């Protein structure tokens, strides 16, 4: 463990370190500096001390010297109501690719209830082995139980790489798992690749509001952990001829569970998930007010699509967080994405997959959204949307009459 200490013989009580500490972790006692428990080992005090009276001893965390060998690429599967989330299959395809570069195996940790059929599907999608825990207590996504059991399994199987979906649940438990394993975590990755020289996992993610891409490596800790957004990667097709192992490791459930899930209620927006929808109609500030959101909802309804929104709309309470598209929301890859009154800030565009056919409606002809749009309509959404809905309904009605 890293530690910090004051060399009493050298400390003169000048208080320079105390003034420099950004966390207020240093106090004076008997004219000597004293380090408090809220110290983060940031090192600011070291630079401030002119008498070399502060010593930090850092643990380099060299996994090769402190934990045996690590190998394999592991995916933490996510399920809901017994169905495996699509992001799990997307991660499996990438895990298969990374494992090929490292000449190693792919394993999946699957926690749930009645998981046997799901485990077989994971093997068909690329897993060599599935480490499954089947228990009624895992029917719901408990954010206290899942990290604990995952950590136990990771410590036993020791994978070199661990991939987790950057869903709402994945984002919640990944930091807890990383903390318990004392390793690093790169969140919201858009690209993963093995460095040919070092064999390290290079993890690329947007930084500074999406204005540049940062590539991060974790050379001293294992496993190398990353979360990846749904729809950023492409899932491979199932190969039912593949064979693999289903292993049921022994785990110890935590005895004192503070979190109990009484009931899970899906909102209307969650019933049609924007991540899985073929058509997404999204609202921006150009919609003007919450009462005008019904225009977006009507268009989505007539097209059989889902309603999305920018962060500004969600912050105002006009839409739910589960509908948010963008860097701090969800990444979507629909066949058609209709942006209604959306200017096109880089943070929002980060949530739209390049494969989507983008239709933009905005009265500002210079709006950035038109630069990435496949089709642009310059006009007021409050005028364009009602006419668009009316035309689509006429087309639907005429089609029904013809078929009749």
Image (spheres, rainbow, N blue to C red):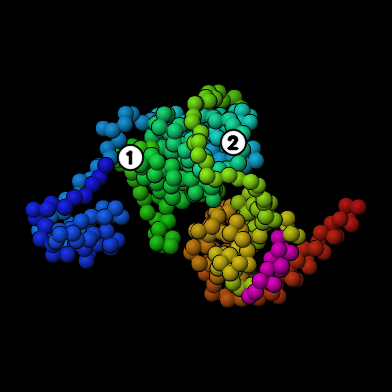
Q: Residue at x 63, y 54 (%)?
A: 274
Residue 282 left/right relative to 234: right
Residue where numbered disc 1 is placed? 221
Specify few, some or many for label 1: CA neighbours under 10 Å numbering under 14, 14-19, or 20 or more: many
Q: Residue at x 19, y 50 (%)?
A: 5
Which image quarter: residue 402? bottom right
Residue where numbered disc 2 is placed? 137
Specify the segment rendered in magenta: 288-300
Q: Main secondary structure of the magenta part?
A: helix
Residue 56 left/right relative to 125: left
Q: Give the camera-side residue of 110 and 191.
A: 110
Magenta stretch: includes residue 296: yes
**Residue 289, can we see it?**
yes
**Residue 374, can we see it?**
no
At which x and y percent is residue 356? 59, 55
Q: Give the camera-side residue of 219 and 373.
A: 219
The kind of secondary structure element at disc 1 is loop
Is residue 130 shown above or below 365?
above
Number of numbered labels in the structure image = 2
Magenta stretch: includes residue 47: no
Q: Residue at x 47, y 38 (%)?
A: 148
Which image quarter: residue 11? bottom left
Specify few, some or many for label 2: CA neighbours under 10 Å numbering under 14, 14-19, or 20 or more: some
């Amino acid at each position: 463990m890293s530690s910090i200490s004051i060399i009493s013989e050298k400390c003169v009580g000048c208080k320079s370190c105390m003034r420099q500490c950004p966390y207020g972790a240093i106090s004076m006692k008997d004219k000597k500096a004293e380090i408090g428990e809220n110290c983060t080992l940031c090192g600011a005090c070291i630079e401030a001390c002119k008498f070399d009276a502060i010593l930090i001893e850092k643990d380099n965390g060299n996994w090769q010297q402190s934990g045996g060998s690590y190998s394999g690429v592991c995916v933490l599967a996510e399920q809901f109501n017994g169905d495996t989330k699509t992001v799990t299959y997307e991660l499996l395809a990438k895990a298969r690719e990374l494992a090929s570069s490292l000449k190693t195996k792919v394993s999946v940790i699957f926690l749930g209830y009645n998981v046997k059929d799901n485990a077989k599907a994971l093997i068909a999608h690329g897993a060599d082995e599935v480490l499954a825990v089947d228990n009624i207590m895992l029917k719901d996504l408990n954010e206290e139980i899942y990290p604990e059991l995952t950590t136990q399994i990771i410590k036993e199987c020791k994978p070199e790489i661990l991939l987790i979906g950057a869903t709402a649940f994945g984002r919640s438990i990944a930091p807890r798992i990383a903390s318990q394993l004392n390793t690093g975590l790169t969140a919201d990755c858009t690209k993963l690749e093995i460095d040919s020289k070092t064999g390290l996992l290079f993890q690329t993610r947007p930084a500074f509001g999406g204005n540049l891409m940062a590539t991060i490596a974790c050379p001293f800790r294992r496993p190398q952990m990353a979360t990846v957004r749904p729809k950023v990667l492409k899932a491979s097709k199932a190969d039912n001829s593949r064979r693999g192992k289903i292993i049921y490791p022994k785990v110890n459930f935590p005895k004192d569970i503070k979190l109990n899930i009484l009931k899970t209620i899906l909102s209307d927006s969650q019933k049609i998930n924007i991540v899985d929808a073929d058509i997404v109609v999204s609202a921006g500030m150009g919609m003007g007010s919450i009462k005008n959101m019904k225009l977006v909802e009507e268009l989505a309804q007539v097209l059989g699509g889902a309603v999305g929104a920018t962060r500004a709309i969600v912050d105002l309470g006009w839409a739910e967080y589960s509908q948010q598209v963008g860097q701090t929301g969800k990444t979507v890859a629909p066949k058609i994405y209709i942006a209604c009154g959306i200017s096109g800030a880089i943070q929002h565009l980060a949530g739209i997959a390049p494969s989507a056919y983008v239709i933009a409606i905005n009265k500002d002809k210079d709006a950035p959204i038109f630069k990435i749009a496949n089709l642009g309509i310059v006009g007021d959404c409050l005028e364009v949307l009602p006419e668009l809905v009316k035309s689509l309904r006429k087309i639907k009605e005429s089609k029904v009459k013809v078929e009749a």
